[in-house]
Amino acid sequence: MEYNLKNKSIMVTGGAGFIGSHLVDRLVKEKPSNLVVVDNFFLSKESNLTEAKTNYPKLKIFNQDVGNLFGICPKCGELCKRST
């Protein structure tokens, strides 16, 4: 099954960890209109996203625990409005 992610909005939770950052690198190649990473950086680091930030300058990164959706949604704006 193939998905067309071009011009879609995507949020990756835990996107700065080892697996999440590789997923983000792959998603960047799909050319989404919005790509947001939410991570609390407990076991991860922002430097894992260096390649993604270089290849996708619009990448939004939030240092936030995903358990606090009320803290995330105001920051993500339109992306959260579409997902609710």
Image (spheres, rainbow, N blue to C red):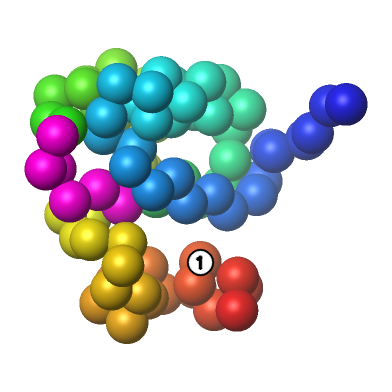
The x and y percentages for residue 55 are 37, 22
Residue stretch rendered in magenta on the structure = 38-43
- Please tell me whether residue 39 belongs to the stretch shown in magenta: yes
The rendered magenta stretch, by its main secondary structure, is classed as: loop
- What residue is at 14 percent from the left and 43 percent from the top? 41
Quadrant where the image shows the N terminus: top right
In-front residue for pair 69/2: 69
Q: Residue at x 44, y 45 (%)?
A: 12
Where residue 10 sits in the image (x, y, percent)? Answer: 54, 49
In the image, residue 74 sits, relative to residue 79, either above or below, namely below
User: Which residue lies under the disc numbered 1?
Assistant: 79
Q: Is residue 41 above or below residue 65?
A: above
Q: Identify whether 48 is placed above or below 38.
A: above
* Picture quadrant where residue 25 is located: top left
Image quarter for residue 58?
top left
Q: In this orientation, does residue 30 appear?
A: yes
**Number of other residues with Cα within 10 Å of mark 1, as a class: few under 14, some 14 to 19, many 20 or more:** some
Q: Secondary structure at mark 1?
A: helix
Position of residue 18 in the picture relative to residue 26 (left or right): left
Q: Residue at x 16, y 32 (%)?
A: 44
Amino acid marked by disc 1: Leu
**Residue 52 seen in the figure:** no
